[in-house]
């Protein structure tokens, strides 16, 4: 009996979320009721989902069959360790975001709060159902519900033309992706017509067909996750959506795509071919490098974070690629290491990217400004947001002792031991790929310093910023929750990995738990302490202890006197806020070094301009290389078809007549 | 697990770093002056400077934030941790498992992010300029440094610094060509990371050329003292890292007190020679334009990757 409790609990949670959403429709304009009652309730459900998933990790898979669905095909549900890891992520990340949202949504911004509440909780419920689905039909229904509810959330503020366009682009690419996923499932049934995942697991596919299924899944889930070249919706949709929605999409929804990719590559397809890994590795590297370079040159804070999400998804794809390569060569220990890096980065990214997106939400509310060029100095009026954002920035940069570093460390460790691969050139190329991963990590530091330094530090670039206010109590609570997750993931890696190891073990047949158990909980040594080890708690304690001891000693031995004066700045005392770097100025070295990577339109002032101005506009090459040609082709084909539509009824009747004749000729008995 | 003598050795290594680091900076400054036919400043100048700065009041700009005041302590903490991890006298360090070579690079990165943010905090043009350039040098140098570490980690089959040093110090005399590439790359990276000529000049306040100095312009009193001390600790940590990786002979493997004592004069000798070489490099080179720095560090990266490939191609077959 106990074995069925977890999946039932999660189902009840999904229904509760749906019910909370419907409750929002009872009084769609009552903001207080919705934000102060329904959203906190949703957060509680989220914590419940997280706890249930945490508890079910390591126990055998549980299944359930619902009565709803098609006549011959009821919904199959299954909770195994892989689903549980992602449900854990969904539960805990969404709890923080929902608490924050309780303080965020106000009157008179876009759609009615009740409608928003319905869309938001439907979005949550559908993501949970995606994780639980155990047949292609249930999966696609949940997947599409997720896409549609998030589309409506993105277009909350639908009165603006650009937001409608962003929403449309998102919907379009989501559906291109959905086609890929659907076809992939179709291939995996092997023509047997049984769409349950259980049947797919037993199919023996020819290498050609399993490769086709993998590539279709990579393209389909890649469109949702934001892999290049299907990433274009991300930097449009994230700035358009309200901040809690951006946080939810970037932190959680992108991970459902990663979940799908893992489910297909390691669970449904049980054979692995080595070059799949190479494809994923290369696509991941291109995505990561592309994402981080574009992140450094953005001037809109949410676009910057959106590109940074692309970078992180790229790193996750690199990890998946590495896992596939190791798995194909039956090097299960290393595959487990890379897989742990993937899962850990999913968890870490869900924490810190949600945190950063929510911080931009607070900044947006306090200043009504999204452009970096008009912010600055916000650490003074908003110390809470600024210091919590710093945690997100450090984690996102991949620096110890916070969460991002752990996964990057694991990823690099798995790269380091790749030369054992029984494939000569792969052996060479893989460590060099590690060099690119490191470059990406280092560039992420540049992007994040820009993000933080321009928003929170320096002088205020606009006088109106003085009136900015710190986040409210609900918002602070949500931010604090996510920052604590980031800290916990950063300093307790062994504890977390021991829990999520069940998923690695399920997918690959081996995990890291035995190795980790040999050492203490404070030490992360996935192979052996002689080979590599990391003790983040000790790092944190040492830095903190030196900090406090140093401060105490200096004050004790000398003094703690402080005088205030105007800034020295080499003696130039008439510098206003305009003398600081702008967002464009800060990223100038990147634009110069990586010039061919960007499509730039620049205007430089001439020497004797009376009204000199400088402008630079950076655009994505992929629009011009990939999307615009396709769009032009489509519109060219449609102009051809337009000639058929003369608008005269006689011509249309003739078309029907001809069609009828042709059909009669062709379809003779 | 953690022996008393190990703990003693660890404490001793940290204290030695705190004491020796300013001395190393002073020694490099002195050598530089001699090479340039100037009258050399006293060897103990950095200590006088620290003492003077600690005594002075802190003058903060009106809009200095809490981050500005916390940053010197955080940076100092990072550098102390780095000095605790790098094997200087002995490889028996209780702190060594806390961070392997990759995490060490992360700790340096943390300090870099904090100093760049602190530079941006006052909102002067020089501060943001310095912060931006520091991050530029950082993202160019960090991959090269990690490639160097990868090469060594592949030789030793470990990223733990203690294991790498033990493997390299107690090997039979095998010549690794990859180490030569890695060594040159490491030298270039250390020059860039420690704000040395030809990437940066620690002695300049000329507005167009400074990187490190531009970020710390607004610091004074004890904050500046901590930052200067941290900078010399960083130079010390990098020097010791280079010595440990490429000239590891003499570093005690066990925890015997005698071996520890014997390691001290050898370390001093190696550091003194290293200081002379650093001063020599700084004298014969000119500071390069900031946009030549990517090429310079690109060379380091290429050399490091070449070292890695040499390791994979030539040395693994033996």
Image (spheres, coloured by chain):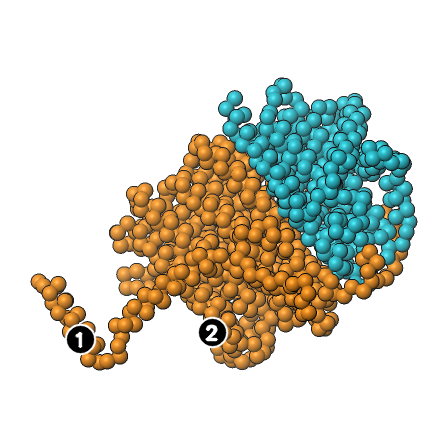
Chain colours: A orange, B cyan
Relative to A58, residue A600 above or below = below
Q: Are marks 1 and 2 in contact (CB under 8 Å)?
A: no
Q: In the picture provided, is A63 more to the left or to the right than A303?
A: left
**Separation of marks 1 and 2 at Cα, in angstroms:** 51 Å
List the single residue furthest toward the top.
Answer: B172
Mark whose residue sits in front, 1 or 2: 1
The count of marks equals: 2
Q: Residue at x 17, y 70 (%)?
A: A659
- Is there any visible trace of residue A591 in the rendered image? yes
- Is there any visible trace of residue A174 in the rendered image? no
Q: Give the numbered dot on residue A654.
A: 1
First along the sequence among labels 1 and 2: 2
Q: Are marks 1 and 2 on the same chain?
A: yes
Quarter of the rendering containing residue B151: top right
Q: Give the numbered dot on residue A22.
A: 2
Q: Residue at x 62, y 32 (%)?
A: B182
Relative to B157, residue B125 above or below = below
Q: In the picture provided, is B89 more to the left or to the right than B152?
A: right
Residue B214 image point, x, y percent: 76, 52
Q: Nearer the viewer, residue A394 or A83?
A: A394
Q: Secondary structure at mark 2?
A: helix
Q: Residue at x 82, y 33 (%)?
A: B35
Q: Residue at x 86, y 40 (%)?
A: B46
Residue A185 image point, x, y percent: 34, 54
Residue A19 image point, x, y percent: 47, 71
- Quarter containing the N terminus of chain B: top right
């Amino acid at each position: 009996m106990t074995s069925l409790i977890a999946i039932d609990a999660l189902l009840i949670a999904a229904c509760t979320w749906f019910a909370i959403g419907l409750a929002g429709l009872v009084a769609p304009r009552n903001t207080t009721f919705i934000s102060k009652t329904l959203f906190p309730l949703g957060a509680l459900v989220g914590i419940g989902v997280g706890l249930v998933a945490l508890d079910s990790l390591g126990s055998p898979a549980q299944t359930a069959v619902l009565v709803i669905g098609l006549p011959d095909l009821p919904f199959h549900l299954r909770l195994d360790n892989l689903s549980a890891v992602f449900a854990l992520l969904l539960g805990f990340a969404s709890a923080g975001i929902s608490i924050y949202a309780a303080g965020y949504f106000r009157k008179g911004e876009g759609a009615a709060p009740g409608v928003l509440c319905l869309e938001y909780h439907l979005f949550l419920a559908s993501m949970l159902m995606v994780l639980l689905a155990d047949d292609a039909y249930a999966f696609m229904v949940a997947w599409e519900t997720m896409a549609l509810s998030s589309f409506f959330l993105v277009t909350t503020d639908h009165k603006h033309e650009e937001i409608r366009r962003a929403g449309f682009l998102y919907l379009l690419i989501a559906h291109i992706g959905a086609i890929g996923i659907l076809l992939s499932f179709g291939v995996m049934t092997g023509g047997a017509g049984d769409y349950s995942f259980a049947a797919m697991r037993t199919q023996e596919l020819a290498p050609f067909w399993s490769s086709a299924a993998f590539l279709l899944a990579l393209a389909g889930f890649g469109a949702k996750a934001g892999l290049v070249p299907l990433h274009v919706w991300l930097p449009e949709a994230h700035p358009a959506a309200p901040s809690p929605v951006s946080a939810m999409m970037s932190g959680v929804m992108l991970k459902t795509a990663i979940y799908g990719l893992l489910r297909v590559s390691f669970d449904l397809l049980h054979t692995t071919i080595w070059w799949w890994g190479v494809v994923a590795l290369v696509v991941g590297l291109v995505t990561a490098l592309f994402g981080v370079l574009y992140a450094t040159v953005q001037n809109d804070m949410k676009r910057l974070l959106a590109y940074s999400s692309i970078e992180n998804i790229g790193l996750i794809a690199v990890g998946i690629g590495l896992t596939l390569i190791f798995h194909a060569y039956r090097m299960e220990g290393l595959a487990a290491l890379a897989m742990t890096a993937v899962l850990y980065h999913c968890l870490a990214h869900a924490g810190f990217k949600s945190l950063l997106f929510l911080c931009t939400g607070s900044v947006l509310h306090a200043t009504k400004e999204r452009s970096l060029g008009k912010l600055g100095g916000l650490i003074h009026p908003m110390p809470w947001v600024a210091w919590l954002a710093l945690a997100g920035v450090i984690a996102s940069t991949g620096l110890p002792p916070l969460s991002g570093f752990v996964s990057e460390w694991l990823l690099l460790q798995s790269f380091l031991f790749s030369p054992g691969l029984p494939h000569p050139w792969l052996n060479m190329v893989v460590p060099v790929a590690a060099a690119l991963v490191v470059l990406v990590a280092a560039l992420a530091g540049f992007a994040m310093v820009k993000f933080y330094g321009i928003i929170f530090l320096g002088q205020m670039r606009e006088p109106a910023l003085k009136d900015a206010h710190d986040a409210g109590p609900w918002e602070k609570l949500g931010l604090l929750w996510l920052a604590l997750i980031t800290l916990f993931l950063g300093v307790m890696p062994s504890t977390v990995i021991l829990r999520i190891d069940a998923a690695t073990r399920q997918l690959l047949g081996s995990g890291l738990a035995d190795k980790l158990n040999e050492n203490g909980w404070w030490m992360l040594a996935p192979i052996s302490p002689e080979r590599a080890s990391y003790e983040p708690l000790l790092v944190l304690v040492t830095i903190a202890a030196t900090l406090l001891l140093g401060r105490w000693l200096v004050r004790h031995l000398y003094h703690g006197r402080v005088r205030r004066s105007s800034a020295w700045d080499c003696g130039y005392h008439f510098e206003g806020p305009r003398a600081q770097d702008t967002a464009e100025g800060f990223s100038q070295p990147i634009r110069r070094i990586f010039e061919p990577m960007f499509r730039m339109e620049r205007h430089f002032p001439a020497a004797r301009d009376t009204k000199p101005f400088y402008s630079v506009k950076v655009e994505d090459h992929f629009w011009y290389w990939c999307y615009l040609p396709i769009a032009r082709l489509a519109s060219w084909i449609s102009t051809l078809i337009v000639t058929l539509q003369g608008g005269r009824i006689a011509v249309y009747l003739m078309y029907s007549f001809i069609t009828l004749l042709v059909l009669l000729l062709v379809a003779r008995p | 697990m953690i022996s008393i003598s190990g703990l003693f050795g660890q404490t001793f290594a940290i204290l030695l770093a705190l004491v020796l680091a300013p001395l190393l900076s002073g020694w490099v400054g002195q050598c530089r002056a001699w090479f340039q036919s100037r009258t050399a400043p006293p060897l103990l100048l950095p200590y006088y400077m620290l003492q003077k700065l600690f005594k002075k009041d802190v003058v903060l700009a009106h809009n200095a934030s809490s981050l500005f005041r916390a940053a010197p302590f955080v940076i100092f903490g990072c550098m102390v941790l780095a000095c605790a991890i790098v094997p200087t006298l002995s490889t028996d360090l209780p702190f060594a498992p806390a961070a392997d070579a990759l995490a060490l690079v992360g700790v340096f990165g943390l300090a870099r992010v904090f100093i760049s943010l602190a530079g941006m905090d006052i909102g002067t043009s020089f501060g943001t300029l310095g912060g931006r350039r520091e991050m530029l040098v950082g993202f160019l140098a960090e991959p090269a440094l990690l490639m160097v570490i990868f090469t060594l980690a592949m030789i030793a089959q470990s990223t733990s610094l203690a294991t790498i040093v033990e493997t390299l110090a107690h090997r039979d005399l095998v010549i690794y060509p990859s180490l030569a590439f890695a060594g040159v790359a490491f030298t270039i990276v250390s020059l860039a990371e420690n704000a040395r000529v030809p990437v940066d000049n620690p002695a300049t306040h000329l507005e167009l050329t400074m990187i490190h100095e531009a970020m710390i312009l607004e610091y004074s009193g004890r904050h500046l003292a901590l930052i200067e001390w941290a900078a010399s600790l960083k130079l010390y940590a990098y020097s010791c890292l280079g010595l440990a990786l490429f000239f590891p002979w003499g570093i005690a493997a066990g925890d015997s007190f005698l071996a520890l004592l014997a390691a001290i004069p050898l370390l001093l000798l190696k550091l003194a020679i290293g200081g002379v070489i650093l001063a020599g490099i700084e004298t014969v080179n000119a500071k390069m334009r900031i946009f030549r720095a990517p090429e310079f560090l690109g060379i380091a990266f290429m050399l490091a990757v070449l070292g890695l490939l040499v390791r994979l191609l030539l040395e693994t077959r033996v």
